Image (tube, coloured by chain):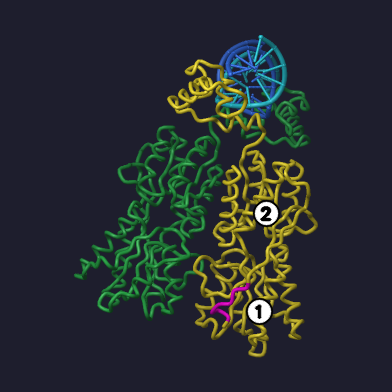
Chain colours: A yellow, B green, C blue, D cyan
Amino acid sequence: MATIYDVAKLAEVSPMTVSRVINQKGPISKSTKLKVEQAIETLNYIPNKTARSLISKTTKILSLLITDISNPFFTKVARGAEDKALQLGYQVIFSNSDEDINKESKYIQMLLESRVDGVLIAPSGDHSKKNVQKLIKNRIPFVILDREINGLESDIVLGNSHEGTRGLMKHLIENGHKKIALINGPSHISTARERKQAYIESLQFYNLPVVEALIFETDYKQRSETTIIDILLDLPASLKPTAIFAANNFIAVTMMKKLKERGLNIPKDMAFVCFDDVGPMSDFFTVAAQPAYDFGYLGVQMLVDKIEGNSSQNNRKIVLPPEIVIRESSL
Amino acid sequence: MATIYDVAKLAEVSPMTVSRVINQKGPISKSTKLKVEQAIETLNYIPNKTARSLISKTTKILSLLITDISNPFFTKVARGAEDKALQLGYQVIFSNSDEDINKESKYIQMLLESRVDGVLIAPSGDHSKKNVQKLIKNRIPFVILDREINGLESDIVLGNSHEGTRGLMKHLIENGHKKIALINGPSHISTARERKQAYIESLQFYNLPVVEALIFETDYKQRSETTIIDILLDLPASLKPTAIFAANNFIAVTMMKKLKERGLNIPKDMAFVCFDDVGPMSDFFTVAAQPAYDFGYLGVQMLVDKIEGNSSQNNRKIVLPPEIVIRESSL
DNA sequence: CTGTTAGCGCCTTCAC
DNA sequence: GTGAAGGCGCTAACAG
């Protein structure tokens, strides 16, 4: 592969001159510029970004560290991130932590070695604090996505779990549901804590009892099995819920599948709502849809602002409201 | 950020010795190794992959160039690719061409400059040949995904469009459908050509007429509007189809939405089948589901084989069969 | 307007 | 078992 020296030799100039025409920087005569351009062409010269990085201490690469690209929420986040990154001249490396702190730590190490210019991270939970602190220690700019880390201030792009939950609960309750099960994510993730809190507050607001037997905690991951539905359906009639609120889309998918297996009809036998869109074909589901694309898009914008020093402030917080979309599953 | 020199100084050894302990290569005494490790620890030294790349001429980065990560098919491809890449010690940069040859070309240029070790590409169409040839010219290993490029042999991981189409058509026809519309992708994409051909052959196999008015060509992208459904529904009763076969998931989503808008019930008023899964919540759709995860997983495996020279052969072709999943939309 | 020198952080090669 | 010299491809800083 041709180097700047090869080009220089062919064009009968110094490597520095070649560098100048490549980077369109510094004064160059039309004629030498032409010579160089021809040499570049005939040698099929392509600048080596790796060598540049060594000098510029900049890679023009961003890291997108999410929990699972398969989750339609994060798929859209990724799309938004990549679109904005391209616009700003960055490439993005993506990684899936699978909500696993160890996997997350491994990726953090890798991205540190890669000298990425910045990191967009959806933390796997509050324990991610140590990973984020590693970023801080190494002065690599980052923006947190979707989940706050307990006891850590930072630039962040978030949804509004309270608003989304209240909207969903209001809809359910005003449609006559009094016994609503919550199938939540792990309490070490901020969104799960907030969704539970808003769930409880909503019940209280409508003077409905908070029944512990109707509150479950699982994880946000895609699962093939669950016993929660069995437990719910075995509840005595006085307790058995008429509606289920799943705290994210993957929980919803798992529960729905089980509900179908058990022969229940949605919404006739059980109303069903959840947080997050469930994918392109979601015309059936009542959801609190978050503007996932914007999470990624704005996140990258914020991050690059920070990297390139265009931003005066720190700990900027963008909160994006969800949209309550009422569909068949709860009617 | 600490360099190998800082570590060397602190440990009172030469940089070379530090390099040796980092890479666990060459003989080192226990005691110096310990000294070095301590220095690394106290200085929080992290090897600079960028500098390494300059010497090794290897970046341990793969490029995944697909058309749209938002497409559930490619989402899974990406997941499979990343999983295998992690296993093999590679990171992956992803890019979305949006089925646009110009965008694709731009990315090809970027990845060439980045000196990625290999490329996994789902070509935007037959015109991608020039981009792939650029890869060949620059000797960068690649594996093609999902779509063959007319007149180009290469390592490739593919689905079986014929088999999937025949399966779907068989199901429809054996359920009594005689007028089946095909809403296909662009004919410059191999999968569209093959699906159309298999569609026609299936009709002929069952002695059914091939009606040009029932064959449409659109693109594989997500769209918010379409006139195709209107055209179909305005057809005289003698022609109006009783079933629709969408050539990919995005086409299916667009058409379904329109069908709903027009007040049609699936499958009562119109049966509906498509190629590719439509996302995690696809329990409604009859589809030819491709093992998308394996496309990515095996693709990376093949690619890294090539990169690391473990593979003797060229132009290896992996064909992954689809699974016909019959669900409500066609019953 | 163009060229020279030096060095980014690391590793290969060859000495000792 | 350890170190010194040199260079990967490029560009900043200075010189002319």
- Along the polypeptide, which appears first: circle 2 or circle 1? 2
- Which residue, as the protein is rendered here, is positioned at the far right? A151
Of the residues shown, which amino acid type is indicated by label 1? Answer: Ala
Position of the C terminus of chain A, as image quadrant, is bottom right
Residue A48 drawn at (x, y percent): 55, 30
Look at mark 2 in the image and give the residue it sits on: A101
Q: What residue is rendered at 72% in x and 70% in y? A: A162
Instruction: Specify whether B59 is left or right of B189.
Output: right
C-alpha distance separating marks 2 and 1:
29 Å
Instruction: Specify whether B186 is left or right of A55.
Output: left
Number of residues whose C-alpha sits closer than 10 Å to that of mark 2, classed few (under 14), some (14–19) or many (20 or more): some
Residue C16 drawn at (x, y percent): 67, 10
**Range covered by the magenta-colored residues:** A324-330
Residue nearest the observer in this picture, A73 or B291:
A73
Residue nearest the observer in this picture, A132 or A120:
A120
Residue D7, quarter of picture? top right
Disc 2: which chain? A
Look at mark 1 in the image and give the residue it sits on: A181
Residue B314, quarter of picture? top left
Of the residues shown, which amino acid type is indicated by label 2? Answer: Ile
